[in-house]
């Protein structure tokens, strides 16, 4: 990826930051909401309050990662988190 | 009145922390600062900031007080930073408003 | 985008800050102005009298007006005179912002007041950029996230953050701009981080509905009900039977004892057996935002039907964070603190934008630079002028338009908004055709004159309006000094290679 033209690298990192970051943030919030030992309404709030810390960290990762392809690693981290967050729905879909 | 005290203590605190740094002390007084004196200045600075928090909490309560305190500290620091390069002695002299306020509190 | 972590963060801070800084400046300026939205509303509608009428008298007069003119309506809304909003307004609409009739609190008679977007325009622009509400909220949310990233990357790359905490070296060109940018950013870091993060928290469930999707299968109504926000059942049957309204005044007193100062009330199904009186407090009696809270009384018996309950820890935390952003608490001293901090945050963003050009000016502005780079640099320069000075001009232009436009003009509010965007567009065009330094001086100078001249419109009968004009005067003087200094500043001499190549080309 490092041989690719600069504009493509920037586009890739920006995409990773915006979309990969959103995926990670969304998945992390869902995962937290599912795992927190609180009443569901409270869990939703407590899980979403730190969302923008995750998103900011994801943006920094997308531009600090060694190459523009590695920036998309955010999606790889998001997947298992989403699975934890949505495991009842996942089970239903599998059944 | 409490508010004024909070602001003045915040300014004094920022001034103490500022003058406790070598480069700023030298800029104002044109001589080096002995390390012990620097420590005193910084200690006094932190103490003044704590007193500023106390006064802000007296003025607004302990929920809103700390919010105001952060704002007051930041703005006092900014005023100091903007005054220092132009009128360094004035920037330092402004801290005398604090004992003046103190006297007002005692006698008025 | 570069080799080390610090280098890539510096790249992100620079380019993210530049591209998104233009709109972020607009968001921060309008947000700062929105701190005094009600005061600006009051100034922009000079027909509203300053009054010393008690809320009890005002309430009785409002109700007697509604009894006379709207006895059959399904809903009465009354906005009572408050410290920041001395007017008395009645309406029959569901939402409080549209329509309604302004009353004289002394006589209870209707008064003609010019339509105006008021200071509320700045509030709305701040979180929607005047786009359709849902789109605007998302766009501003994305910008706020970029702001957060800019703040964090700024901290990361500022290696001497403690050593240079108090450093400001004026009259040194680029160094001074960097010092100013650093000082305004670092000294107010708690404010910047707080205001940006809390801004995102306001609509956090719209941006990241993951929790609701996972735990409530995306059903927001189920989520709201789980919060204990179920709407009270409306007494349909009783609403068809006639009834006599109880005196509102003792209920207002009861609500005030429980909630603090009162902003207004609604009466649903007035003059029926199913009448309900909802009394709402002024926002800001505590940090946590009390929007939507109301004490509900039976409209015939005066019995308390629904009291405000204390929030649980999680929703309380969110409301406190939202309240920290809305800045309605703490009275006028706190409001001024927020306003001044807001102004400094605008200075931070603007100085960053200017620094970008100052840093690269020598390299890209001279004839020796390659043509495409020169064009991009010129575009950046023009955007800086148009989005910084131009926006300020547009804001004060809105205030002038609101006084110059005829009071009976149809669709007056739309014309005020057109004036705002029109001035902004003209400023961008002006920046495009004038040399950069002159454009800055002319736009800042004009803005300064218009701010200072706000007092010429008179109508300074009460403290709120005097405050608006006085504050504008101070800001105008500061902008005027800035314009003068920009005019006096001598551009830095070319150094080294750039100088030699210019000489070679000459």
Image (cartoon, rainbow, N blue to C red):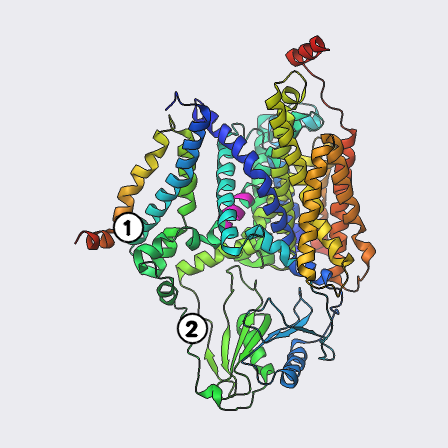
Residues at discs 2 and 1 in contact (Cβ within 8 Å)? no
Which stretch appears magenta? C192-199
Chain where mark 1 sits: A
Quadrant of the rendered image containing residue C437: top right
Q: What residue is disc 1 on? A: A85
The secondary structure type at the circle numbered 1 is: helix
The secondary structure type at the circle numbered 2 is: loop
Q: What residue is disc 2 on? A: C231
Q: Position of residue C325 (x, y in %)?
A: 54, 53
Label 1 crowd (10 A; few <14 / some 14-19 / many >=20): many
Quadrant of the rendered image containing residue C82: bottom right
Q: Position of residue C38 (x, y in %)?
A: 66, 61
Quarter containing the C terminus of chain B = bottom right
Residue C459 placement, left or right of C331: right
Quarter containing the N terminus of chain B = bottom right
* x 67%, y 60%: residue: C413
Viewer-closest of C248 and B55: C248
* x 83%, y 55%: residue: C456
Label 2 crowd (10 A; few <14 / some 14-19 / many >=20): few
């Amino acid at each position: 990826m490092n041989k690719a033209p600069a504009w493509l690298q920037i586009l890739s990192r920006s995409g990773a930051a915006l979309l990969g970051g959103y995926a990670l943030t969304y998945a992390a919030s869902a995962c937290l909401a599912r795992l927190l030992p609180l009443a569901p309404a409270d869990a939703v709030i407590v899980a979403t309050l730190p969302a923008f810390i995750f998103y900011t960290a994801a943006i920094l990762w997308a531009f600090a990662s060694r190459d523009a392809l590695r920036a998309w690693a955010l999606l790889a981290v998001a997947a298992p988190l989403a699975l934890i967050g949505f495991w009842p729905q996942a089970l239903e879909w599998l059944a | 009145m409490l508010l004024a005290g909070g602001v003045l203590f915040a300014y004094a605190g920022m001034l103490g922390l500022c003058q406790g740094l070598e480069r700023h002390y030298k800029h104002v007084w044109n001589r080096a600062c002995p390390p012990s004196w620097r420590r005193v200045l910084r200690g006094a600075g932190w103490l003044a900031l704590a007193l500023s928090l106390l006064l802000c909490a007296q003025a607004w309560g302990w929920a809103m007080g700390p919010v105001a305190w952060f704002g007051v500290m930041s703005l006092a620091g900014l005023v100091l930073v903007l005054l220092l390069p132009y009128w360094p002695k004035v920037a330092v002299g402004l801290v005398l408003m604090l004992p003046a306020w103190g006297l007002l509190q005692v006698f008025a | 985008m570069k080799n080390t972590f610090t280098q890539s963060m510096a790249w992100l801070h620079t380019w993210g800050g530049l591209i998104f800084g233009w709109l972020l400046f607009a968001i921060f300026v309008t947000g700062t102005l929105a701190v005094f939205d009600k005061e600006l509303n009051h100034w922009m509608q000079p027909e509203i009298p300053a009054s010393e009428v008690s809320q009890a008298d005002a309430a009785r007069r409002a109700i007697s007006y509604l009894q006379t003119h709207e006895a059959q309506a399904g809903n009465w809304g009354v906005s009572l005179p408050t410290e920041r909003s001395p007017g008395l307004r009645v309406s029959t609409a569901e939402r409080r912002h549209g329509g309604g009739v302004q009353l004289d609190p002394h006589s209870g008679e209707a008064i003609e007041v010019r339509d105006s977007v008021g200071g509320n325009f700045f509030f709305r622009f701040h979180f929607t950029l005047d786009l359709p509400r849902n789109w605007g909220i998302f766009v501003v949310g994305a910008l706020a996230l970029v702001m957060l990233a800019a703040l964090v990357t700024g901290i990361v790359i500022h290696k001497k953050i403690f050593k240079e905490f108090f450093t400001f070296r004026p009259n040194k060109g680029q160094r001074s701009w960097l010092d100013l940018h650093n000082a305004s950013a670092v000294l107010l870091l708690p404010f910047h981080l707080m205001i940006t993060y809390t801004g995102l928290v306001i609509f956090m469930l719209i941006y990241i509905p993951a929790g609701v999707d996972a735990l409530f299968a995306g059903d927001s109504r189920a989520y709201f009900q789980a919060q204990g926000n179920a709407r009270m059942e409306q007494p349909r049957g009783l609403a068809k039977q006639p009834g006599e309204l109880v005196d509102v005044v003792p209920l207002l007193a009861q609500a005030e004892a429980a909630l603090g100062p009162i902003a207004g009330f609604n009466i649903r199904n007035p003059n029926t057996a199913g009448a309900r009186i909802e009394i709402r407090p002024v926002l800001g009696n505590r940090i946590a935002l009390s929007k939507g809270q109301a004490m509900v009384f039976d409209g015939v018996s005066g019995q308390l039907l629904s009291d405000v309950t204390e929030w649980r820890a999680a929703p309380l935390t969110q409301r406190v964070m939202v309240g920290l952003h809305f800045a309605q608490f703490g009275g006028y001293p706190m409001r001024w603190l927020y306003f001044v901090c807001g102004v400094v945050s605008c200075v931070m963003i603007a100085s960053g934008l200017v620094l970008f050009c100052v840093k690269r000016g020598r390299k890209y502005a001279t004839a020796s630079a390659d043509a495409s780079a020169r064009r991009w640099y010129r575009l950046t320069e023009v955007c800086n002028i148009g989005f910084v000075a131009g926006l300020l001009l547009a804001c004060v232009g809105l205030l002038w338009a609101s006084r110059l436009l005829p009071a009976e003009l149809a669709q007056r509010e739309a014309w005020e908004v057109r004036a705002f965007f029109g001035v902004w567009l003209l400023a961008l065009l002006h920046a495009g055709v004038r040399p950069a330094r002159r454009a800055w001086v002319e736009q800042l100078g004009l803005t300064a004159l218009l701010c200072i001249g706000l007092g010429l419109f008179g109508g300074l009968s009460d403290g709120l309006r005097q405050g608006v004009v006085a504050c504008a005067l101070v800001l105008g003087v500061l902008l005027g000094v800035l314009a003068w200094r920009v005019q006096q500043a001598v551009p830095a001499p070319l150094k080294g290679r750039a100088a030699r190549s210019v000489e070679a080309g000459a």
